Each structure stands twice: as C-alpha cells, then as structure tokens.
C-alpha cells in the first residue's frame, strides 16, 4: 500500500479532527484557514483514500468499571502463515482483548487486556487467551497506572 502525500491543510484537518471529531465543516474550515467547499472536498478525499477510516465516540473504560489492565506476552507453537491467521482471527473475537500486536522479540504477540478485576482477568486468561490457536505460553504484566493513553496520532 502506497503512502499518501499530505499537505499542510490535510495534516491540519487530521489534527483538528483528532481533537474534535464532531466539529462542523464551517468551523473546521475556519480553523485550517480555507473556505468550506475546499475543506469538504479535502475531507471527502481523506476518507476515500482511507486516511480517515471512521468516526466514533471515545468511551472512558474506567467509568465503566474496566480499570484492570494487563499486558500479555504470547508465544506460539507455530508461526507459519496459517497459524498466524488462525490466531489473529480468534483474537478478533475476544472482546476483552483491547489491542493485539505481532512483535519481533523472544515472544510472538503482545496483547492488551482490559477487565473489571484480577479475578475476571484470570478467567479470561484461562478460558480465552490460553485457548487461542497455537498458544504455547503466556506471561502477564499488570499495569498499575496509565501514564499516557491516546486515541489519536498526536500531531500529524
């Protein structure tokens, strides 16, 4: 996939939307210094090019009682493409897995798990994560505090 070239107006649109995804086109145009029509055209192009993939509400998991965060290193028994695909597909079906990253290290994946409690996490680990295809072992690291979490890319 080719990298898309963005000019300063495109980058500013992304920065503003990263702060306020519900901003009106008129306010967005004013903030970036263009008129409404070219701003809307650029926004549609950024969406069509797959730079902007969607809009959603950001939910505070702590306010929902989901304040237990664990990071899990996962080692697989098989790392051929079919095994990786099976693991990836199964991970996508586990709602407690907030993030999953294939890692170049002495383990294969790093998972971010969010649950209500240590007891709930232990059940997720035993019944869901350990049962994922090709899992040979896991190591858990419990987060004590989130120092920085961001849903945006920061300044583009």
Image (cartoon, rainbow, N blue to C red):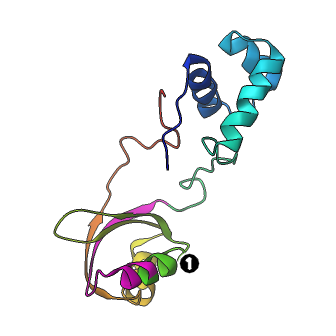
Q: Residue at x 33, y 88 (%)?
A: 134
Q: Which residues are magenta?
A: 67-85
Percent x, y for residue 144?
32, 55
Does the stretch in magenta take in 26?
no
Residue under the image location 44 percent in, 79 percent down? 85
Q: Residue at x 75, y 21 (%)?
A: 39
Against 113, residue 149 (above or below) is: above
With respect to residue 113, does 15 lie above or below? Answer: above
Judge whether residue 124 can be spotted in this image: no
Secondary element under disc 1, as helix, strand or loop, is loop
- In this view, the residue farthest toward the top is 33
Q: Report the residue marked by disc 1.
A: 93
What residue sits 38% from the left and 88% below the top? 126
Image mark count = 1
Q: Position of residue 129 (x, y in %)?
A: 40, 82
**How many C-alpha atoms fall within 10 Å of the one at disc 1: few (<14), some, or many (≥20)?**
few
Residue 88 appears in the rendering: yes
97 vs 74, left or right, is right
Closer to the camera, 96 or 120? Answer: 96
Observer-nearest of 51 and 145: 51
From the viewer's perspective, is residue 55 above or below residue 106? above
**In the image, is 90 to the left or to the right of 25?**
left
The answer to which image quadrant residue 87 occupies is: bottom left
Q: Position of residue 28 (x, y in %)?
A: 73, 21
In the image, is 27 to the left or to the right of 82? Answer: right
Which residue is outermost to the front?
A: 2
Specify the farthest residue to the left.
Answer: 106
Can you give x and y, in whole percent of width and height, for residue 152 in the image? 52, 39
């Amino acid at each position: 996939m080719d990298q898309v070239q963005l000019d300063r107006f495109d980058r500013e649109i992304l920065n503003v939307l990263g702060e306020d995804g519900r901003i009106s086109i008129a306010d967005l145009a004013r903030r970036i210094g263009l008129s409404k029509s070219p701003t809307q055209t650029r926004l549609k192009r950024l969406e069509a090019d797959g730079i902007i993939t969607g809009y959603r509400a950001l939910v505070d998991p702590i306010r929902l009682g989901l304040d237990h965060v664990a990071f899990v290193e996962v080692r697989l028994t098989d790392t051929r493409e079919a095994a990786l695909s099976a693991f990836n597909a199964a991970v996508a079906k586990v709602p407690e897995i907030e993030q999953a990253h294939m890692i170049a290290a002495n383990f294969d994946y790093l998972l971010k798990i969010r649950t209500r409690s240590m007891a709930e996490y232990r059940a997720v680990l035993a019944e869901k994560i350990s049962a994922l295809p090709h899992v040979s072992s896991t190591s858990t690291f419990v987060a004590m505090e989130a120092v920085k979490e961001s849903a945006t890319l920061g300044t583009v």
